[in-house]
Image (cartoon, rainbow, N blue to C red):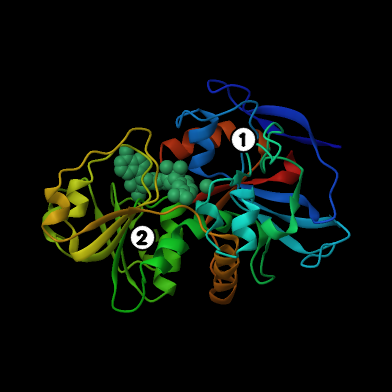
Amino acid sequence: MALARGYAATDASKPLEPFTFERREPNDDDIVIDIKFSGICHSDIHQARNEWGNSSFPMVPGHEIAGIVTAVGAKVTKFKVGDRAGVGCFVNSCTHCATRDLDLEHYMPGLIATYNGFEADGVTPTYGGYSDHVVVKEGYALSIPESLPLDAAAPLLCAGITLYSPLMHWKAGPGKKVAIVGMGGLGHMGVKIGSALGAEITVLSQSLSKQEDGLKLGASHYYATKDPETFTKLAGTFDLIISTVGADMDLAPYLNLLKLDGTMVLVGVPEVPASIHAFSLIGGRRSLAGSMIGSIKETQEMLDFCGKHNIVSEIELIRMDQVNEAYERVIKSDVRYRFVIDMATL
Ligand code: NAP
Ligand code: ZN
């Protein structure tokens, strides 16, 4: 066992604080990553505050991990010491599915979350990226393209893949009109990746305060959802709507913006269940769907795509001791567009 330093939530109602814990020594198929940067996802906040009712404490959040490999096990072939490596939302999965190479391991039972989960033994907690190092099976680590700055690439490990996967699955590309709801950490990645895929991107944000950024990052149109005219003007417009909103909202007005056979995909996870009337779907044979992160294979594909198109997150780099203040600012939508912790300040 090696001692690790990090920041943890010890209780749902307490701020994060310094925390020391143990990481395993690397096995033959493990790599050790010296964590350089760790993104702050809104899911970290939902879980640190037990908003989804599934939290276990103490919790070291962080699933947008970017760093440098400092040791490799004897059987490791993908990485060598000195390589850039990332870890996203999970660190292990059902080996049955993994060996069958379904590349849908993130939807299978047996997925082991990077934090707020338990190792395969069912008792050893997993601890995330707000820490100095992580030990992970090489098959669950990602290669970060050399062309991308490591700090701004960190959020690709969750925010990037969470938007890339539904954009690919629902075939966003030339000729497709796609709306991204919420111009936050996930949303701004949807704008960048969706426009790089060739789709026509519209941002639906609460206000126009981030309009200039949205258009600069690749959106063709930008509308305020607090303006009721937005919903009359855009009725029946979109092939695909992806909602990144993690707060309670009425889905009906958004579903009405879909074309015939259009799909609205939820990636944001509000605390409370949504309620919709059947008429919101049946009139236009519309679909309401969900999507969760992406497989390891797809995450690597996304990183390579971003490397090729020079896509990273817009970030605000912070010190570790600013994490609690950053959480408050994320809740107020006061971040452009992802906080990333410089782990050298731990
Ligand atoms: P974020 O940075 O806080 O962005 C969410 C955006 O939603 C905000 O920037 C804001 O955009 C909009 N918003 C906030 N409150 C709202 C409200 N009351 N009504 C309408 N819009 C509101 O969060 P994030 O890190 O992108 O995460 C977003 C959600 O996705 C969270 O629930 C998170 O847990 C979830 N998530 C899901 C997955 C997955 O695999 N499905 C992966 C990661 C995260 P505007 O200011 O532009 O309106
Ligand atoms: Zn996340």
Looking at the image, is 12 positioned above or below residue 113?
above
Residue located at (60% from left, 61% from top): 296
Residue 113 image offset from top left, x and y in percent: 60, 43
Q: Which mark is residue 322?
A: 1
Residue 259 image offset from top left, x and y in percent: 18, 65
Quarter of the image that includes the C terminus? top right
Residue marked by disc 2: 212
Please tell me whether mark 2 sits on a helix, a strand or a loop: helix
Residue located at (85% from left, 62% from top): 75
Would you say residue 90 is visible in this rendering?
yes
Q: Give, as a three-letter code, the residue at label 1.
A: Gln
Classed neighbour count for the residue bearing mark 2: other residues with Cα under 10 Å, few (<14), some (14–19), many (≥20): few
Q: Left or right: where does residue 295 sit relative to residue 65? A: left
Please tell me whether mark 1 sits on a helix, a strand or a loop: helix
Quarter of the image that includes the N terminus? top right
Looking at the image, is 301 positioned above or below residue 34?
below
Looking at the image, is 97 positioned above or below residue 246?
below
